[in-house]
Amino acid sequence: MYFPTAGIECSPLVPFAAALGVSFFTSMGGVSGAFLLLPFQMSVLGYTNPSVSATNQFFNVLACPAGVWRYWREGRLLWPLTLMVALGTLPGVFAGTLIRINLLPDPRHFKIFAGLVLLYVALKMLRDITRRRQANIASIAPRRDRPHGSACRVLSWNSRLLTFCFQEQEYRIACRGIALLSLVVGLVGGVYGIGGGAIMAPFLVSFFGLPVHAVAGASLFATLLTSVAGVVFYSLLAPLYSGLAVAPDWRLGLLLGLGGMAGMYLGARCQKHVPGTVLKYALAGILLFTAARYLGQAL
């Protein structure tokens, strides 16, 4: 099958299977997997023009609802946090889109940026795993503290502070800090072509001290909203750049999205049978390998 916007030809089963496999593993950690699919499109499929970022965001639009629905049914979708993250990331997504089109159209320059982003996410993931293992050694959590089936309850929310309860513990978040972080994450996500959940979730857990099972739903839903905005913005800008492929490749994005939907559903069903630490180590290894390859090719 030929994909005109991407300028590539491959079997339709290849992008579908890749998205299914990636989403199956990443959905268990509360992220869509777009941060891994972009390297796949660039390195394996040879899709390197700026529209690959828009296509990657279109994947999020189709794939994320399955994961969001799961978190909503479990009562772990914090709507105030979701709204703050979404409103903060939207301006960043718009700015990141302009940067991608005007400053990083060259695949070599973009690979440097993408490699640095992937390297950061991988190191952050390994650091969080190490800290969590040390915490588990120091104290063994009782059965009632396990995250499965636990719901989040908002206690108060105003322009300065969000307070919520999760697993009988109270958490407080400074709204201004969330807004600033969301703006930076949106900027990076707009350039890279992801909603930002893979970057936002580690920050919320590490810097704000929030439980990953409480923020995963908000992060994924914000990824969905910002990806919709990103796809719309890329599409509106496309007529202004007639000599450059900017709009998504809808056919390729549809195949990736359908694979992502199936992968997220299966990942949600199988999550309890796979140790989270094993999955995170595997993802971190893939990220480190891809980052090293990108930086090696570009530098």
Image: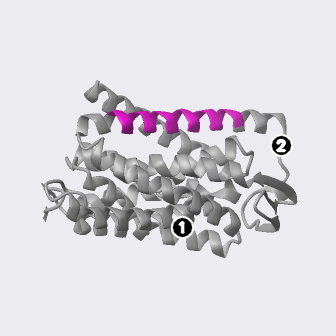
Expressed as whole percent of the image width and height from the top left, the position of residue 233 reads 36, 64
Q: Main secondary structure of the magenta part?
A: helix
Mark drawn on residue 298: none
Taking the spot 68% from the left edge, 69% from the top edge, the residue there is 79
Question: Type of residue at label 2?
Answer: Ile
Question: Type of residue at label 1?
Answer: Gly
Q: Is residue 39 above or below residue 4?
A: above
| Element assignment for label 2 | loop
Quarter where residue 286 is shown: top left
Residue under label 1, please give it.
67
Q: In this rendering, which labeled residue sits more in front, label 2 or label 1?
A: 1
| Element assignment for label 1 | helix
Magenta stretch in the rendered image: 112-131
- Res. 60 in view: no
Instruction: Tell which of 126 and 298 is nearer to you.
Output: 298
Q: Is residue 231 above or below residue 37?
A: below
Left or right of 118? Residue 255 is left
Residue under label 2, please give it.
140
Expressed as whole percent of the image width and height from the top left, the position of residue 279 reads 54, 46
Taking the spot 35% from the left edge, 51% from the top edge, the residue there is 98
Magenta segment includes 51: no
